Amino acid sequence: MTTSTNDSQIPLGRYIFERIRQVGVKTIFGVPGDFNLSLLDHIYDVEGLRWAGNANELNAGYSADGYSRINGLSCLVTTFGVGDLSAVNAIAGMMAEHVGCLHIVGTPSLSSISNRLLLHHTLGNGRFDIFEDMSKHITEKATSIEDIEHAQAIVDDLIVTAFTLKRPVYLGLPSNFVNELVDASRLEKKLDLELPLNEKEAELEIVENIYAKIQEAKNPIVLVDACASRHDVKHLVAVFAETTQFPVFTTPMGKSSFDEDNPRYGGVYVGVLSNPDVKEAVESADLILSVGGLLSDFNTGSFTYNYHTTNVIEFHSDFCKVRAATYSNVKMQYVLEKLDEKIKKGTSNYVPGPLPASVHDYKQVVNVKSGKLTQDYLWKKLSYFLKSGDVIVTETGTSSFGVIQTHFPSKVTAISQVLWGSIGYSLPSAVGAQFALEEIDPNRRCILFIGDGSLQLTVQAISDVCRWNLKPYLFVLNNKGYTIEKLIHGEHAQYNMIQTWDHSKILELFHDKVEYENHRVSTVEELNTLFEDKAFNKNDKVRLIELMLDEMDAPANLVKQAKISEKINSS
Ligand SMILES: Cc1ncc(C[n+]2csc(CCOP(=O)(O)OP(=O)(O)O)c2C)c(N)n1
Ligand SMILES: [Mg+2]
């Protein structure tokens, strides 16, 4: 326990937050409401825990997502009905993208429920279970406390589930239970957060099977995707690459799951949207070791993977697949460990070949010294501004496609919601990531790129930045509206236009005497000057940088993707 209690019993509310703190969470996101107020009181009883107090539940949910991607788990508290429904989009995003979060919903007391009182935040029909039912479909587990005897076990189980499976869970907490007393000594036994071991025989069989395929292969490659970082096997991929010397490629969602400074890094594979030499290298491989694959449309160039599926071995968090054979419940973490041990003991005839030259394409910008700022220049030049430890957050739109062109130095973490793709996600997610970075190492920078359209959905998250004096870089791409949509359909349509904002006034509006800086960049010279400025490189204040870009300027891969998307939408 982080706070000493002499009493052998503590309130359930305090128990929950002590547990949350024990598993490394230090910031709780959410919005108060009368059904959760007495619960929130207990945050202040736990040493080292803080209440972020977001401006709305959607932002709170997105912040919980960003925090969890850096920290491994997050906690969100909302109030019944109005609160949890406002957070639904963020919760579903965490479900889709494998992000662990304990979502606590303060609900009416059991007596109110059993008397079917016509309470505020209900539909007025006496049904109190509807919102939990909704949550069941978008969480790994949704449970409400019904009696105090089972409360601690339920809380523990939900936290372990969210942490180990990297998915959101829902805890309904009727307000009458918050101050009921529970056994404090249960906290002395830490929660077991290790993944359960694989069934030995299945694991042995799959390792032998994969090893044999590796021995036969002449031209194997590794393809790393989103779940490698979400389920924390990045280090195992690094070790595997070192042992085998196989070339390693990532997908857009997998970007930052492998060190791009590693000489065996080959680039980003996105089906037909890939650089031609990357496409050739991946599709001509006779064995593809796919780690943590999440093969969504935007992650695969709309399913344009053109390799033989019979050449693929899939490693997932909860199953593995060798050609047609699926090994359910065999987790990649242990398989990768055992496989590496086996390869280290054996011999190998593998001769590493050259890698695609396009991994160096970002260097094309070094000699560009002037001209109008373009998307192509921005994303390549960004490679030189980033440094080890940075967290870079991009938004659905030109930025999530553009950043594929950026070369990441070692130990950069990328955050983007490529599968769920809810615009407005990136700003509050960056705020959540920034909370986590401040707790882990305040020198690590959080750098956001958000479209001018997306910003308008969740701009209140900047209020959280000012409230907590956080210091992210907020790059806003001003291209006069929904460029990604204009590329897909309706280039001149009024529905793809937005209200023009004066971005230089945003920090002024929200600031609470915090130090801040505004910049506007329209040219290559201005971007270079900013990136080379020592003071600008230090994350000692919040900065908003407006990037002035042509309305229809877009990364080349997005232009191609948009054409494919339009075709698919009308087919
Ligand atoms: C919540 C939500 N509403 C609508 C959409 C559809 N949508 C996808 S991208 C986009 C426009 C993004 O525009 P902007 O942020 O300016 O990005 P740009 O492409 O201009 O860089 C819209 C409306 C969505 N993905 N999510
Ligand atoms: Mg835009």
Image: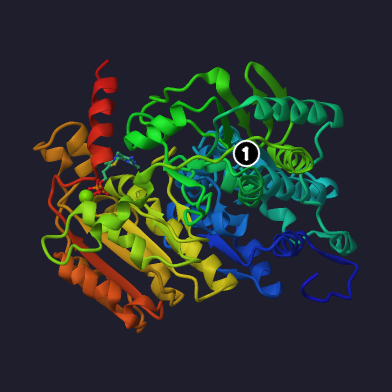
Label 1: which residue? 116
**Position of residue 414 in the picture relative to residue 484 (left or right):** right
Inspect the image, locate mark 1, and give the three-letter code of the amino acid beneath it: Arg
- Protein image colouring: rainbow
Residue 371: give x, y in percent of width and height: 11, 62
Q: Nearer the viewer, residue 286 or 257?
A: 286
Q: Nearer the viewer, residue 161 or 144?
A: 161
Q: Quadrant of the C terminus?
A: top left
Which residue: 21% across, 45% down?
Answer: 554
Which residue: 62% across, 46% down?
Answer: 237
**Residue 434 in sight:** yes
In the displayed structure, 304 sits above or below 250; it is above
**Position of residue 13 in the picture relative to residue 61 (left or right):** right
**Position of residue 170 in the picture relative to residue 389 (left or right):** right
Which residue: 32% across, 78% down?
Answer: 536
The total number of labels drawn is 1
Which residue: 64% across, 37% down?
Answer: 140
Residue 200 lies in quadrant: top right
For the residue labelled by badge 1, is the local secondary structure a helix, a strand or a loop?
Answer: loop
Q: Nearer the viewer, residue 365 or 149?
A: 365
Residue 296 lies in quadrant: top left
Q: Nearer the viewer, residue 466 or 196?
A: 196
In the displayed structure, 384 sits above or below 403; it is below
Residue 322: give x, y in percent of width and height: 66, 23
Residue 315: give x, y in percent of width and height: 64, 33
Q: Quadrant of the N terminus?
A: bottom right
Please tell me how crowded label 1 is: few (under 14), some (14-19), or many (20+) other residues with Cα within 10 Å: some
Residue 276 lies in quadrant: top left
